Amino acid sequence: MLYLSTQTSQNNQQLIDSNGWNVIETEFNPSQLHHKETVFTLGNGYLGTRGTFEEGYPSDSQATIIHGIYDDVAIASTELVNCPSWLSLVVKVGEERFRLDAGEILFYERRLDMRLGLLNREVRWRSPQGHTLDFHFERFASLADQHVLAIRCQITSQDFEGDISIEIEFNPDQNTQGVKHWKTLNQGSAGNLIWLHTQTLHSGMQLGLAAKLVAEGEDAVSVSEQETSVFPCLTKTFQCSPGQTVSVEKIITLFTSRQTETPMAAALNRLADEPSYPTLLAAHIAAWEQVWQNSDIVIEGDRKAQLSVRYNLFQLLAVAPRQDDRVSIPPKTLSGFAYSGHIFWDTEIFILPFLTLTQPALARNLLTYRYHTLAGARRKAKEAGYAGAMYAWESATTGDEVTPRWVPGRNGELIRIWCGDIEVHISTDVAYAAWNYWRHTGDDEWMRDYGAEMILDTAVFWESRVEWNPERNCYDIRDVIGPDENHDRVDNNAFTNLMTQWHLHSALMLWNWLHQAYPDSAAQLALKLNLGTERFERWAFIAKHLYVNQDSETGLMEQFEGFFQLEDINWADYEPRTKSMQSLLGIEATSQRQILKQPDVLMLFYLLRDVYDRKTLQTNWDYYNPRTDHTYGSSLGPAINAILACDLNQPQEAYTHFMRSALVDLEDVRRNAAEGVHSASAGGVWQAVIFGFAGVRMTQFGPVACPNLPLGWTRLKFRLQWCNEWYEFDLQPEKIQSFAEVKQTLEAMQHS
């Protein structure tokens, strides 16, 4: 059982975990192995490690994934690879190996302490031969030093007398979902050290991994080193008596050739200089304390919401690269292999707002990744016959498109995937994130040196992508896929067209600023991107004449041309269900119906929420919300729906959508959490709290709150950084009445 806000004592009484920082599991359930591996993932901005057990199990899904370590693979072109595990620590009690699936578990608790970034496990185990021992495991991936990992194991005998041996190893033959990616260059052990030097088969990325096993007091009666041709291994053996505690610490260092030309030497040198486990732990805890000081959200009156919000933020903070601006956050963070570790719009639209307003240096790293992949975006545009920069729908190291064009279906048939060719809104998603980072941080230097080129060259792409329609005297954007991927190869998708309009307007405003503030930089970009008055006039004309089918009286907007002619369905006919409508009906049948994976028009209204009034939002909400597969469609949708429901003064409906997002991994609400953390949903959770329930609007004077709290929430407290100034928010229902005037003023400003 997984308790979100409770823990269970040995006598099965539930004790309230009042601080809201611990995710606690009180029962070992082999059938939940993979789901819980995702839940208990640890990371430090450099790597992520799934929550598998140190002793290992045949059916587990061990994974340590490092930012930027890609290797070639069939179909998906390249994938983030599974690196050799650092977790292995096997305990033998006499001749019996400690295992949770053997003997008897008398007490069990696994605890993810998110405040400290620690994973702990307490087990009282009776071996098959009847020996009783207590085990305590603790591990962390250091946030203070991204190249350091550590495990502590303490074993206390209740009634066993004899030898206890502890063995550590590195398995060089780690595969990625059955695909081999590594070849060993060197490996070995000496004294209390083991090491492994390995290299990816195709991309040539090297990894150096070293570990030492330190016994407290060094009272081991014997130490045996084992090295085989298969893997480096080290064993320490202790003589133990009842009441005695054996304690060991495994400290691991890890480098890749992305940081140094000699990763093996770097790992060994760093390991030799490492201080004690307590010193490493203290530095790690201090680093997390600093992060939480700026990013925590306090919710009072709803323990489940409090813990689930912190969990989602923890997983994002644990994966955001701190010292690397050439990598980004994949859809499953570094906790699973779905989507091959490729980079989508998830980062820019769903994750970046959180980091921009609480950890702007991390947001800057992620956006600069897109600058480094501009060359790939330009190659993609050129190959497709367009000008400028056309960002890849799925990006990896270079920014070239790595979306597979064909994938095998269930029966071996090939299915054409069009996203990489025509899901072109990604180019504007990147521009939107860059624009808002600049607007909220005031980081003019970054915009001058990086962002301006990204926004302007993707605007050049849109100029070449639109088509003039002489019959309507307007521009079309034909043959695209919007965020609602249930319908592909559509014309004049409202989301794509109106975000393109925003993009072109913003590019013109950006150019005016750049030309005035940094004329030399503007002149260089004008030359590089072939920018000039004639081109800018075309952008303005295109933006003014892009086609959108919107009823002038009601404000109802058609998702794409022909959507209103598609068949409507009675959703009740398909309930109850445990899979998406597309899985039930098939791809083709779903595309012929008004069934939305996520509502494009409503997503548009959120991103451009200052453009549309409440009446227009209500009209479109009433139409598109009932036609959306909220439960098994896209995990990206519910958090956004929560925000819009708040805008429509429906906080309880908002709360229903919000909890679908907040619990997507903790409670496996979509039955796919085993694949890894839903990173976009996690970012959406933060946005739902801040922009939805807190009602924060960004004004020219900074962020202002107009709260609409769910029933039961007695307090909502958080911090935001805007233009290098921190703003503290402490929202409580008895004080919220005073916000009404602020809200009216904002709405008046919005539509004046």
Image: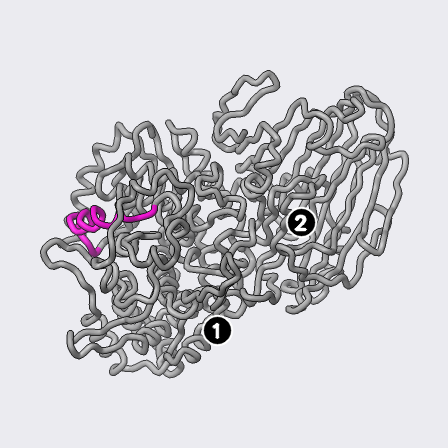
* Residue 323 horizontal side relative to residue 489, left or right: right
- Residue 666 visible? The answer is yes
Q: Residue at 38% across / 57% down in the picture? A: 587
Q: Secondary structure at mark 2?
A: strand
What label sits on residue 148 in the rendered view?
2
**Which residue bears the numbered disc 1?**
376
Look at the image and tell me in which quarter the N terminus lies: top right
State yes or no: residue 617 in magenta: yes
- Residue 484 visible? The answer is no
Q: Residue at 53% across / 54% down in the picture? A: 338
Residue 572, given in percent of the width and then of the height, sits at 29, 40
* Magenta span of residues: 611-629
Q: Amino acid at mark 1?
A: Gly
Q: Secondary structure at mark 1?
A: helix
Residue 748, given in percent of the width and then of the height, sits at 14, 49
Q: Residues within 10 Å of mark 1 (few under 14, many from 20)?
A: many
